[in-house]
Amino acid sequence: MKTQPQSDMKPTTPIHIRAGDLKPALVGLGKVAHPKATLPVLQCIRVEAISASKAQLTASDLNFHLNVTVPIEAGKKGEPFLLSLAAIRDQIRGFKANDTVHLAPNAKAPPVAEFPGAPKFRATPISLSEDMSASLLRAFACASHDTTRHILQGILLDVSGKGKNAHRIVATDGRQLYSSNSMHLPSLKSSIILPDHPLWKWKGIADSVESAPWTLRVGTEKEGTQPFRIESDSWQLTGKTIDGNYPNYRQVIPPVSDFRSRVEMPSEVAEAIAGLIPKLPGKKLQNKPVGIHVEKGLVSLLARETTDQPWQFYPVGPVEVNGPDQVVFANRDYVQRATSFGLTGINLIDPQSPIQFSRKGDIMIVMPVRVGGADKLKRPRKLEPVVTGKKTERTAPPKKQASKPKPAASPKSDPMDDVEASIAEANKALQTAGKKLKSAKGSLGTARDQRSEDQEELRGFRSLFRSIKKLAVGDN
């Protein structure tokens, strides 16, 4: 049967969408559709007015199908059509949020019938709590990007455990492992592996964690894979699970009895670590090492620019420690990720053993890295942590002065601002020292030139003296 081109189909009324609603949707759709896809139809967005007030935009890469619902202005239900993603982007370039975008069929676009449809299936909806949705996104951030390890390019929904909250969300890339027991999925009959995709990093999905509940549906297994669908109020994602056996992740989780030191950080300290790490030197070193230094109730970070330098000491804040003081090194990206996840507990065995970050039912295992000169530390003369503990000062009670109003409390300074101010002050000092050095070099050059001139004059004077002496001898 011959496919009817879009230009010969029943005319479709153009769809009017606010640019402020369309642009964020295109960011997510652009993570699925690609302007350089092999098939022209996969370079397109399927546009359909599903009601007088809503339109559905769909993108597909054959493995993932994303539907995004956006509000439209004074529209009506109409026939679907395809538009090139690149063409839409060009059309809205320079548009402001309240500008109206008119989307209408284009004769150059492929026929809408060629657009691949998402798998259709029926399944019992499983409601995901806010914690479960957040744990899914954290797990995807820890999945492997190694194409030779296909199984690890997904996250495991493990329902093999028995009892309440015995089901887990797991992801690993071989150097880090994230596990959360924040879910209970009694209607899921067997464990499944959900594939990773750039779409999981889309802000539209991340923002919906708190704004609307998620729903998961898993279809019947066919040829080793199962269709699944995760949806919120404004988006719907459909794909297929990964077929295979996930590695036994439990064997890399140390038993509680192995931990010698248990560190509990206030949330402010964990946030400070996550914010400070990107500012530390040594980003280009192999394995991106950063040290976690725990001593006398204070946690600090260690970093250096090159391997021949001592480790610089960066005090962060007070912590509760149960066990001996320790120093361990790990990849800075993993440490930052764990603390940004809000994992405030650090459980340590020794410098050569895995590090466990934890908070309630969430844990993250990070493998240590070996570094040279771990004992060479350059400590500051005065310890000034980014986060300071509360100090109780004994002062005499002030006399009551009802006639004088209390001065307004000064706003609390951000600890990270203090760090950045210190860095800026250090940079300014370096610039001043550089200028002084340059000036000294200039003075030295001038002195050398003057010395050369004096030596030249002295040689001339000696020559003149010898000439006069010869004349005097000749006269005699």
Image (tube, rainbow, N blue to C red):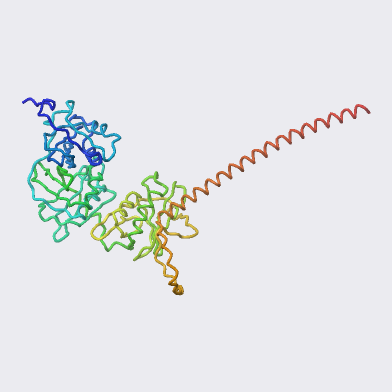
**Residue farthest along the left direction in this orientation:** 1
Instruction: Name the foreground residue: 364 vs 247.
Output: 364
Looking at the rendering, which quadrant does residue 166 occupy? bottom left
Q: Position of residue 98 (x, y in %)?
A: 26, 40
Looking at the rendering, which quadrant does residue 145 occupy? top left
As displayed, is residue 188 above or below residue 96? below
Q: In the picture provided, is 218 more to the left or to the right than 43?
A: left
**Residue farthest along the right direction in this orientation:** 476
Q: In the picture provided, is 168 more to the left or to the right than 430?
A: left
As displayed, is residue 256 above or below residue 91? below
Whether residue 135 can be seen here: no
Q: Position of residue 159 (x, y in %)?
A: 14, 54
Q: Position of residue 134 (x, y in %)?
A: 23, 52
Instruction: Name the foreground residue: 293 vs 407.
Output: 407
Instruction: Name the foreground residue: 457 vs 11.
Output: 11
As displayed, is residue 277 above or below residue 88? below
Looking at the rendering, which quadrant does residue 117 occupy? top left
- Location of the C terminus (image quadrant): top right
**Residue farthest along the front direction in this orientation:** 403
Determine the residue positioned at 26% across, 51% down: 177
Q: Position of residue 247 (x, y in %)?
A: 20, 49
- Location of the N terminus (image quadrant): top left
Whether residue 282 can be seen here: yes
